[in-house]
Image (cartoon, rainbow, N blue to C red):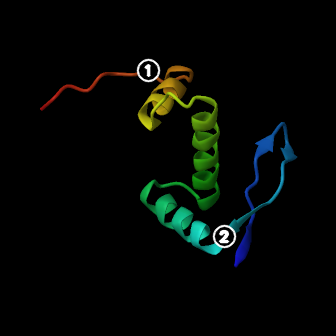
Amino acid sequence: MIRICSVWFLRQGADMGIVKIDDRLHEEARKASTVMCRSINAQAEFWMKIGMLAETNPTLSFNGIVKAQLANGPVRLVEAEAA
């Protein structure tokens, strides 16, 4: 069964639309959103963004994609030291 899940992307004040997803995928997004402290919509948007970046950058790992996104944003990356 397909669930119609509202995934709203606000760009310059304009609503971008609704995405249809399978009930099982919606449930996984709900579970992941709880663990990651995101709304269900924010979790779905995160997965879509990572998926799009993975398709356009097939040589990068998930960690490489996240690191590149952090480097391009207003975040200062600090290397963690081993305990």
Indicate whether 30 appears above or below 53: below
Residue drawn at point x = 64 percent, y = 49 percent:
45
Q: Position of residue 73 (x, y in %)?
A: 56, 24
Residue drawn at point x = 60 percent, y = 43 percent:
51
Indicate whether 16 appears above or below 27: above
Q: Toward the viewer: 57 or 23?
A: 57
Give the SS element for disc 1: loop
Mark 2: amino acid: Asp
Number of marks present in the image shown: 2
Residue drawn at point x = 84 percent, y = 36 percent:
12
Q: Position of residue 55 (x, y in %)?
A: 62, 36
Say which mark, if any, is on residue 76.
1
Q: Toward the viewer: 69 or 38?
A: 69
Q: Give the quarter of the figure containing the C terminus.
A: top left
Mark 1: amino acid: Arg
The quadrant in which residue 44 appears is bottom right
Residue drawn at point x = 42 percent, y = 59 percent:
35
Residue farthest left in this picture: 83
The quadrant in which residue 81 appears is top left
Say which mark, if any, is on residue 52.
none
Q: Position of residue 47 (x, y in %)?
A: 58, 49
The Cα atoms of the two marked residues, 1 and 2, are separated by 37 Å
Give the SS element for disc 2: strand
Q: Do the residues under discs 1 and 2 have CB atoms within 8 angstroms? A: no
The residue where tag 2 is placed is 22
Judged by depth in the image, the label closer to the viewer, 1 or 2, is: 2
Left or right of residue 10: residue 65: left
Q: Position of residue 11 (x, y in %)?
A: 80, 39
Badge 1, how many Cα within 10 Å: few under 14, some, many 20+?
Answer: few
Residue farthest right in this picture: 14
